Image (cartoon, rainbow, N blue to C red):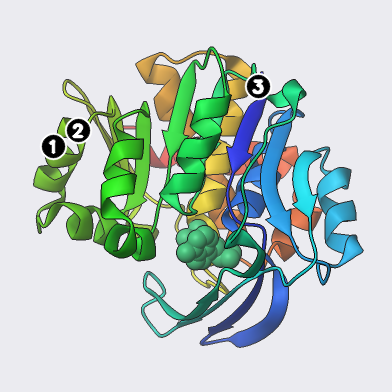
Amino acid sequence: MSIVVIGSVALDSVETPVGKVENALGGSATFFSVAASFFTKGVKLVGVVGDDFPQEHVDFLRGREVDLAGLERVSGKTFHWSGRYGDNLNVAETLSTELNVFESFQPKLPESYRDTQYVFLANINPELQMDVLRQVRNTKLVVCDTMNLWISERKAELLETIKQVDIFVLNDAEACQLTGESSLNKAAKRLLDYGPERVIIKKGEHGSASFTRTSYFSSPAYPLEDIFDPTGAGDTFAGGFMGYLASTDDLSESNIRKAIVYGTVLASFDVEDFSLNRQRSLTRDEIESRFAEMRAMTQF
Ligand code: AMP
């Protein structure tokens, strides 16, 4: 099964305790698409880049067989995010967000995208997420992510969007910010009241938890000792999660749990290097071997 994703395609400048990169390939839709491409060859990206976006990045995405019919190139500058991580690698400090070509972007889905059953609304302005949702027919699974900027600047639009999605994925700080709760269990319950059937809360190195009205599942993170750059871990988690679900087309509780573990495994590779560098050499065998380790680790 294929997946439509709307989100940022970016050039990132990132500083972590072990180094920094300038104008490296990034963006929520980029990390998502590359992660999902390890499971399905039908990732259809919706986004926009400026005329400064290097052709080598387009070639890399094409090489991962990501469908770029919905990626517009317009004159102007590509979305640019600049962030810094201190010793607590779970918390990104945004230094600047330059929306640039995303400011006037109006997504128009190619006809070949409109019947896609799996849709991922990656982190971007919720108004754009809704624009995409209006243009797809017959969806089977709609998953949505967001971040603190949109919670503070577009809360009403975000609440309108999550009413219409099946699964809402966000991190612990965002769940607390959006609900005003300090307990994650309470926050999850409040988020379920907004409409989605399932809420998945990511907790960085502490793993993730999935909540529905009748089930709870918790996965640890893969235990890494050294983290180079956490940027994109959340989007990569979502890409592994949804890529696996779309490839199996099975939305049972047990398969969703497996998908969460695949998401966790993909995210663990992402943080081993800056930008998408680790993904360039990653193989399906490495993914399967870490998945088996996760299974052994959580069996009792
Ligand atoms: P993550 O670390 O998974 O939360 O995502 C990091 C990616 O999100 C970076 O590559 C950024 O380019 C992108 N990003 C940062 N801020 C925003 C924003 N406000 N809207 C969309 N994408 C963003």
Q: Residue at x 57, y 55 (%)?
A: 28
Q: Tell me the residue at 51%/46% (across/down).
A: 128
**Viewer-side label of 3, 2:** 3
Q: Which mark is residue 192?
A: 2
Q: CA distance from mark 3 to mark 1?
A: 32 Å
User: Which image quadrant is residue 63 in?
Assistant: top right
Label 1: few (<14), some (14–19) or many (≥20) C-alpha neighbours in 10 Å: some
Residue shown at 57% from the left, 23% from the top: 136
Along the viewing direction, whichever of 41 and 254 lies nearer the viewer: 41
x%, y% of residue 129? Answer: 49, 42
Instruction: Identify the element where label 2 is drawn.
Output: helix
Name the spot of residue 222 as percent of width and height, x first.
46, 52
Task: State how far apart marks 3 and 2 are (Cα).
Answer: 27 Å
Distance from the alpha carbon under mark 2 to that under mark 1: 5 Å
Q: Are marks 2 and 1 in contact (CB under 8 Å)?
A: yes
Q: Earlier in the sequence, mark 3 or mark 2?
A: 3
Q: Are marks 3 and 2 in contact (CB under 8 Å)?
A: no
Q: Is residue 115 left or right of residue 185?
A: right
Amino acid residing under circle 2: Leu
Amino acid on which the number 1 mark rests in the picture: Lys
Give the quarter of the image for residue 18: bottom right
Direction from residue 31 to residue 165 in the image, left or right: left
Residue at the image point whose x is 17% and y is 20% from the top: 214
Residue underneath mark 3: 114
Counting residues from the start of the chain, the first of labels 3 and 1 encountered is: 3
Q: Position of residue 10 (x, y in %)?
A: 66, 65
Q: Quadrant of the N terminus?
A: top right
Q: Which residue lies under the disc numbered 1?
A: 189
